[in-house]
Image: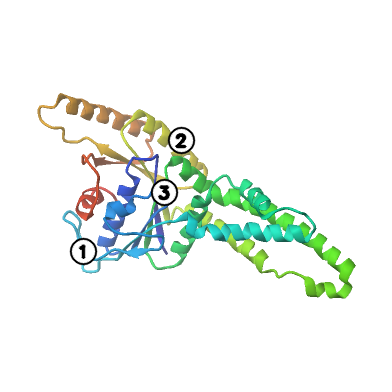
């Protein structure tokens, strides 16, 4: 059974670094691992210093970086940056199917008008929909032992977890309208064509596509809320505003039934330079913030990552982070 690890939090706190480092560590421990970026502003390719696209790419084999233990049975490491445009047609097809049935019942609406109606039922964009759709695809493929998700910033993350329920309601409405339209259309055809109306009926294939889409959203919800296989780790930095935002995110995730067991506090100054009063002051401030974080979240494990002073790119620098994160 494929496990899932999500890294979430506001933008710029180091979610991508954490996801990439965790993927590196899992692969070194012998697990086939896929790291997925669902953030529209991708930086996963930069972290791995590799060319990535919208399909999973296996990263080239390389020696395990210093600081990570690797057995004889090291797993494969894969990565992908989700391209929302690559999945857009699937959802447009659902809207066009609804438009066709309504027109068949004599309701004169354009494709654009129907598509706007369909979109109004969902509070998020195609990037969140694609993320949930691909979550199911990657988990159910059985190809990987663990899938690690680098999610979008907090606002996008909240919308992502709202999507199964919100889209389920939208699809219920769409199917109800389609059913009404079809009954009206069938009655009109029967009145005009009599027994020949059976020859003019539409296929049920499109109904199956709507049902299939809704089933996949429900499947995504089941995966996200299964504590036996899914963990959400919130990443933050030692700042007051980040603590408040993290508190809201943790509450929202728990309301949605998503397991949150760990916080990852990134960019903590641990070894200030000798003879640098400003550095010592910053270290003291970070220690105060860490104390506040532990007081605010007494039931969560709090992990800290060092401030590495610069971008974390490449396997060697990722290994420094990976050694501090659980797999």
Residue 14 placement, left or right of 193:
left
Gap between marks 3 and 1 measured at Cα: 27 Å
- Circle 3 sits in a helix, a strand or a loop, which is it? loop
Comparing labels 2 and 1, the label whose residue is closer to the camera: 1
Residue 16: x and y in percent read: 33, 48
For marks 2 and 3, the one nearer the N-term is 3
Residue 60 placement, left or right of 220:
left
- Circle 2 sits in a helix, a strand or a loop, which is it? helix
State the residue position of label 1.
Answer: 62
Residue 133 placement, left or right of 38:
right
Comparing labels 2 and 3, the label whose residue is closer to the camera: 3
Q: Check disc 3: other Cα within 10 Å, few if <14, some if 14-19, many if 20+.
A: many
Q: Quadrant of the N terminus?
A: bottom left
In which image quadrant can residue 32 be found? bottom left
Q: Height in image: 198 above or below 232?
A: below
Q: Quadrant of the C terminus?
A: bottom left
Gap between marks 2 and 3 measured at Cα: 20 Å
State the residue position of label 2.
Answer: 248
For marks 2 and 1, the one nearer the N-term is 1
State the residue position of label 3.
Answer: 39
Q: How is the image coloured?
A: rainbow
């Amino acid at each position: 059974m494929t496990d899932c690890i999500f890294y979430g939090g506001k933008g710029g706190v180091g979610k991508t670094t954490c996801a990439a480092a965790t993927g590196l560590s899992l692969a070194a421990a012998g697990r086939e691992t896929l790291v997925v970026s669902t953030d529209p502003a991708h930086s996963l390719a930069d972290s791995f210093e590799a060319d990535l696209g919208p399909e999973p790419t296996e990263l080239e084999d390389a020696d395990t970086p210093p600081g990570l233990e690797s057995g004889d049975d090291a797993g494969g490491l894969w990565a992908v940056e989700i391209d929302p445009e690559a999945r857009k047609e699937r959802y447009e097809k659902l809207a066009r199917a609804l438009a066709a049935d309504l027109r068949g019942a004599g309701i004169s609406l354009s494709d654009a008008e129907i598509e706007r109606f369909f979109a109004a039922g969902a509070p998020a964009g195609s990037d969140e929909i694609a993320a949930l759709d691909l979550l199911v695809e990657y988990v159910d493929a059985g190809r990987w032992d663990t899938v690690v998700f680098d999610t979008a910033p907090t606002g996008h993350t909240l919308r992502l977890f709202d999507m199964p329920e919100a889209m389920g309601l939208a699809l219920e409405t769409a199917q109800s309208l389609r059913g009404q339209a079809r009954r009206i259309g069938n009655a009109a055809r029967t009145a005009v064509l009599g027994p020949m109306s059976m020859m003019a009926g539409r296929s049920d294939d499109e109904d199956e596509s709507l049902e299939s889409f809704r089933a996949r959203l429900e499947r995504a919800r089941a995966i996200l809320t299964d504590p036996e296989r899914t963990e959400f780790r919130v990443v933050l930095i030692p700042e007051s505003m980040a603590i408040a935002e993290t508190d809201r995110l943790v509450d929202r995730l728990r309301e949605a039934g998503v397991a949150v067991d760990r916080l990852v506090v990134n960019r903590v100054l641990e070894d200030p330079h000798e003879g640098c009063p400003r550095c010592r002051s910053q270290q003291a401030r970070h220690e105060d913030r860490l104390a506040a974080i532990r007081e605010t979240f007494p039931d969560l494990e709090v992990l800290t990552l060092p401030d590495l002073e610069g971008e974390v790119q490449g396997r060697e620098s990722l290994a420094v982070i990976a050694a501090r994160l659980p797999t």
